[in-house]
Image: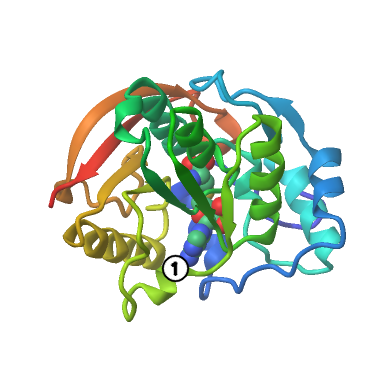
Amino acid sequence: MQDGRRRPEGDLDQLAPEVFRPTMPEPNAPPPDPNGFIRSNTRLLTPPLVPEVRLHLAEESLPIWHKTEEELGESGLPPPYWAFAWAGGQALARYLLDIASLVAGRTILDIGSGSGLVAIAAVIAGARHAVANDIDAFALAACRLNAAENDVAIELSGVDLLQAAATSPPPPCDVLVLADLFYEKPLAAAALDLATRAVRAGTTVLVGDPCRSHFPADRFSRLVTYNVPVTRELEDSEIKATSVWKLAA
Ligand SMILES: C[S@@+](CC[C@H](N)C(=O)[O-])C[C@H]1O[C@@H](n2cnc3c(N)ncnc32)[C@H](O)[C@@H]1O
């Protein structure tokens, strides 16, 4: 590597600790032209398991990661998660499209939305309202562009709801969705805490996760498993067995 950065080989579990050390990053400052950046550095593609949805996606992680740092004039940023349709997101989006009654007419909150895939799929499946939440300003810009590309309306939220979870009531919604958020310990703990509070408040909590390192499978019921096509560059395999899970009340 020219700049000495380690190639993100292997599973997201190995990638994440490096980039989140020592603490979770602050939200990125919005780039001057996020839409132009996203359009120039991605292609419109369909995630293999969710061909109904078109997203601005990158085919390789390092070039867009470097360009993000150049664009913001910062180094040590987290990877551009928003530029990929992660295994958990693909599985959960597939499930919502196939079992549309889970979300039809309901309000959805997608925390760690990334590309917006799950929120967009929820609206296509008939959700009354969907909020895509992410702390990365690029992700929110990507969610906006991707929603427009699929002719759906979603609300965007950049509030760190996971930081607020310990002291605040869970955000009101009918269905809370979390896809591929259990790859890093503090993030996983905060996500589980919020999910637990939400389920106690009567919210349905659905998770897409391929059993990442910090996913507490014993707390969830498995609803379905898909063999999700992924890239070897990101996951160290071409297929990732990924389940949709429901948090028990
Ligand atoms: C691995 S990606 C998953 C994206 C998407 N859910 C999917 O499955 O394709 C994790 C996402 O969580 C976001 N994230 C990390 N910490 C967060 C927080 N505290 N609140 C909201 N989003 C967060 C990251 O910015 C990133 O977009």
Q: Which residue is mark 1?
A: 161
Q: Is 128 drawn above or below residue 34 in the view shown?
A: above
- Callout 1 amino acid: Leu
228 lies above or below 215:
above
How many numbered tags mark residues here? 1
Where's residue 139, x and y in %? 64, 52
Residue 69 point in image, percent of width and height: 78, 60
Which picture quadrant has residue 59? top right
Mark 1 sits near ligand 1, with its Cβ under 8 Å away? yes
Q: Going 30% across and 73% down the picture, which residue do you hit?
A: 169
Note whether residue 155 is visible: yes
Q: Specify whether 177 is left or right of 5.
A: left
Disc 1 is placed on an element classified as: helix
Q: Residue at x 77, y 30 (%)?
A: 43
Horizontal side of 194 relative to 44 (left or right) equals: left
User: Relative to 48, is 242 above or below?
Assistant: below
* Identity of the residue furthest to the bottom in this view: 167
Residue at x 39%, y 47% (from the top left corner): 107
Percent x, y for residue 46? 62, 23
